[in-house]
Amino acid sequence: MVKRALLILSLLTVSSYGATYQINVVKEEPSAGVEKRYVIYRVKRGDTLLKIMKKFKVPRRFLYRIVQINRLKNPNLIYPGQEIKLPVGKKEKVERRILKGRRSGIERELHLIKLLGGRVNREGYLFVGNRKISLRRNPIVKVGEEQFLLDFSGLSSSVKQKLAEVGISVVNGKNVSPVLEKVISANFSSLQKNGELIVGENDVLTYHYDYLAYNRYTGQRTVINTSPDTPPTLKSLLAAYGIAVVEPPFKVPDDWEGWGRLKILTGGGLQKIEELIKLFTGSRGKKIPEGLVFPKLKLAVVYDYITPERRTELELQGNRVFVLKGNFLSDVESILSLIPMANKFVKLVLYEPPGTKGKRSKFVIEGLLVSTPKRDWFMVDSVDKPEEIPYLRYRGVNLIIY
């Protein structure tokens, strides 16, 4: 016979900004004495069984077992509000997983507080009258001589009053921004919140920050963010403009676009054109006194001193003749239209993180977009800062600099 005991671990917050949901941890004790533990999870919109397993670090080999336990006819068909029972390990591991999911946003902010010089105490207990407060669940943050307790337990007003009498201020654990701002103010000056930086001349970067301050010792402009959504390449680009970024460690997003290719054209104008056409079509040019002929493409690219007789001769050989006008980008656009090849001048706009439409930053650069059967290329004459090159490549742009 199986005995069941139900333990409710209160309302659990998905992140510091997310909704709340309730998890019941069920302990089942078979008569044989072998202890099993489960997490019962209420399905939310957008969940899949594999996503839920990943959330609680349940190995994929348990998929069939989960289907059996929950009597699922189709593991790909679950619906919001449905309760799914997941087999997990020992109680301590269950609690750690739940705690991690519940306070992931707060963990980032605590990490940031430590990065900025605040001290976080998460060990031991605090006893207030007959109340025992776990510092693991309700950490204390020390900023200079001030102490703040992050309340995740819903402490009573009388307990808060007693803590205040001994110099400990109580802050709602769901919002540690006041403590974070105290830490920033202790080490930086001229604190600004939720603003935008605009840097660059031709290539414009608009960057939204959570906090902007000046380092008290170096005077450097420093951006401080609570979310880890500025990739290293973007940090390097901001550093080129004298702006430091402090935030929790960046994690590559699931929709990371990968590294783009880079081609830097060298030599004179005609050499660059030859290199481009070879890159786009694989066809090599043949030198003639007036310029280049591409036999496979039936195309001649010549200087403006070509004689009418020579031009006619090339045309009679079946070549389309293009006379260079001296504006490289305009000449390239016209030549590519003769091959033919899709090309157009565009303003390339990159959002960071991908898909957020400028939540953190927006980068705009003008150039010629060329579409080939293999890939798209973006061609520019230069960039404002060398750090733009790895940033564009990181975002998956196949870049040509002429």
Image (cartoon, rainbow, N blue to C red):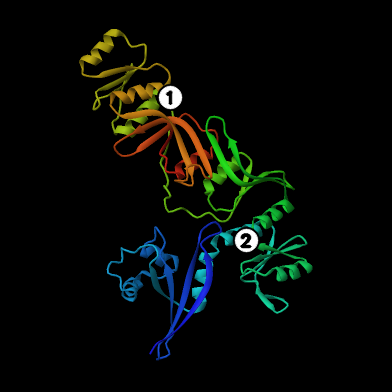
- For residue 329, what is the image quadrant? top left
The quarter of the displayed image where residue 344 is located: top left
- The residue under label 2 is 110
- Residue 85 rendering spot, x and y as whole percentages: 39, 73
Q: Nearer the viewer, mark 1 or mark 2?
A: 2
What is the three-letter code of the residue carrying label 1?
A: Gly
Residue 212 position, x and y percent, is 65, 45
Q: Horizontally, is 354 left or right of 114 in the view?
A: left
In the depicted structure, whether residue 170 falls above or below residue 25:
above
Reading the chain from its start, which is encountered first: label 1 or label 2?
2
On the image, the x and y values in percent for residue 251 come to: 50, 55
Give the residue at the far top of this rendering. Answer: 308
Whether residue 265 is visible to the viewer of this picture, yes or no, is no
User: In the rendered image, which quarter contains the N terminus?
Assistant: bottom left
Amino acid of disc 2: Leu
In this rendering, the answer to whether 256 lies above or below 333 is: below
Can I make out residue 208 in this image? yes
Q: Residue at x 53, y 54 (%)?
A: 250
The label on residue 268 is 1
Q: Is residue 145 above or below residue 24?
A: above
